[in-house]
Image (cartoon, helix red, strand yellow):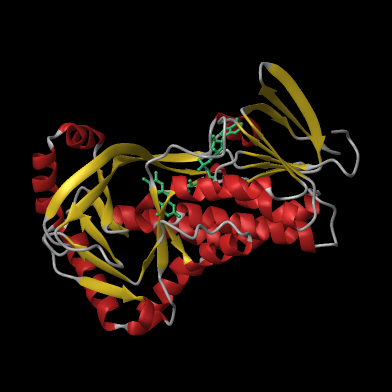
Amino acid sequence: MDDTNQAPIIVIGGGPVGAATALGLARQGLQVHLLESRPTLRADDRRTLALAAGSQHLLAQLGAWPSVAVTPIHDIHISQRHRFGQTVLTAQEAGMPALGHVLRYNTLMEKFSEVVQETPGLCVETGAEVTAVIPGNARAEVVWQCQGQERRAKTPLAILADGGRALTAQVFGAAREKPYAQVALVAQVETDQVAGNLAYERFTSEGPIALLPLGQSYTVVWTGTKDRVEARLLWSEAEFLERLQEAFGRRAGRFLRVAGRSWFPLALKVLPSVIRPHCVAIGNAAQTMHPVAGQGLNMGLRDAAQLIQLVTRDSSADVGSGAQLQRFVALRQRDRRWGIAFTHSLVGVFSNDWPVVTQGRGWALAALNGLPGMRRALTRVMSFGF
Ligand SMILES: Cc1cc2nc3c(=O)[nH]c(=O)nc-3n(C[C@H](O)[C@H](O)[C@H](O)COP(=O)(O)OP(=O)(O)OC[C@H]3O[C@@H](n4cnc5c(N)ncnc54)[C@H](O)[C@@H]3O)c2cc1C
């Protein structure tokens, strides 16, 4: 690569946001270099994702929507433990074929690893650990290690999609961070009822429990304090199922089996500014959120969609120029601000037992239950952003 106008755009991080961005830019005829530190784009990650309609649309356009191991969600049942107030969001009421789809992170990355191979203009380099990104007035410079060798290249646009690791802080400064007093336990559970297409979100004083249907079984995301989650990882299967039943109730049937328990730390991390000269941060690098509302990747993919559109269709500014990046910030501002605030307030309001708050959220759920217009508005926001 050389330092000319034709130098490729460099995308750092081949997770779902980086891979989608690289693919989208290359499909529009741009030269793109994707750098991923793992030895392959395929992942070994136990997380299950609920992706909204807007995300499915983008991934389908990119040819990266998996055709197998994906379960549509038709309805979402929302309730709170030991308190009144519940509601059901339905695809039928929203006039949509599905409220979202459930799939594993690994399934998505498997699909990306297939399609990137066939994309002209896209060079994927795995085993490439980026060690520095240096913003500059004319170009940004990217430095990486691959097979024990240091490489460097200049680019009109370095896109950081590293998931908010150390590199992001090095380039953009420290994120505003708020660790939650919760971590998430993730596992596969079977009940005596076929999972179908109904997802559950149940709020408890310790944090939310989500059941996401995937094939015949569910993925449970059970949040709690780190000490409790560590204990839950060690419980026998029988004890785990009994305690989960007690916490979740019986609306999804009797829990019969659990497998693949693992946990993830949870924190809110937001970059005060996502741009530097010829550099931009997107996805979890720009904002890492609690999974309570299933918004993290959905928002990251909206970052990707907007950036692809600007870079490929806005002929009024050069690729990676200050004017273009400022425009990106302006276009993403509302969705980022409200999406982060919405998710953060859900965690606060639905994770405590203060009497005033429990009453208030009971009334809020009851009101939502009685107001179809409000349910439709909520569904729309969760599907397409703010
Ligand atoms: C338990 C849990 C459940 C979740 N559920 C949902 C959900 O239902 N719906 C939803 O929308 N979101 C959900 N999320 C959030 C979602 O997982 C993230 O928002 C999403 O993975 C972010 O994608 P990303 O590509 O930005 O970052 P990542 O997925 O973190 O990918 C970053 C990539 O960058 C690579 N990388 C890092 N540093 C470097 C470097 N220096 N050089 C080269 N490569 C590098 C990494 O190896 C990785 O492949 C959940 C999160 C958790 C923890």
Query: Which image quarter is the N terminus in?
Result: top right
In this rendering, does residue 130 appear at all?
A: yes
- Does residue 289 sit above or below 295 in this rendering? above
Front residue of 288 and 107? 107
What residue is shown at x 32% (from left), y 58% (from top)?
215
Front residue of 68 and 168? 68
Query: Residue 279: which quarter of the image?
Result: top right
Query: Residue 65: which quarter of the image?
Result: bottom right
Give residue 182's position: percent from left, percent from top: 29, 41
Query: Residue 377: which quarter of the image?
Result: bottom left
In the rendered view, does 66 fall on the left or right side of 233?
A: right
Number of numbered markers: 0
In the rendered view, does 134 fall on the left or right side of 296?
A: right
What residue is shown at x 73% (from left), y 56% (from top)?
27
In the rendered view, does 48 fall on the left or right side of 254?
A: right
In this view, the residue farthest toward the right is: 4
What residue is shown at x 79% (from left), y 46% (from top)?
31
What residue is shown at x 51% (from left), y 68% (from top)?
384
Give residue 234's position: percent from left, percent from top: 17, 31
Front residue of 378 and 195? 195
Give residue 362's position: percent from left, percent from top: 20, 68
In this rendering, does residue 386 appear at all?
A: no
Give residue 149's position: percent from left, percent from top: 71, 17
- Does residue 269 sit above or below 304 in this rendering? above
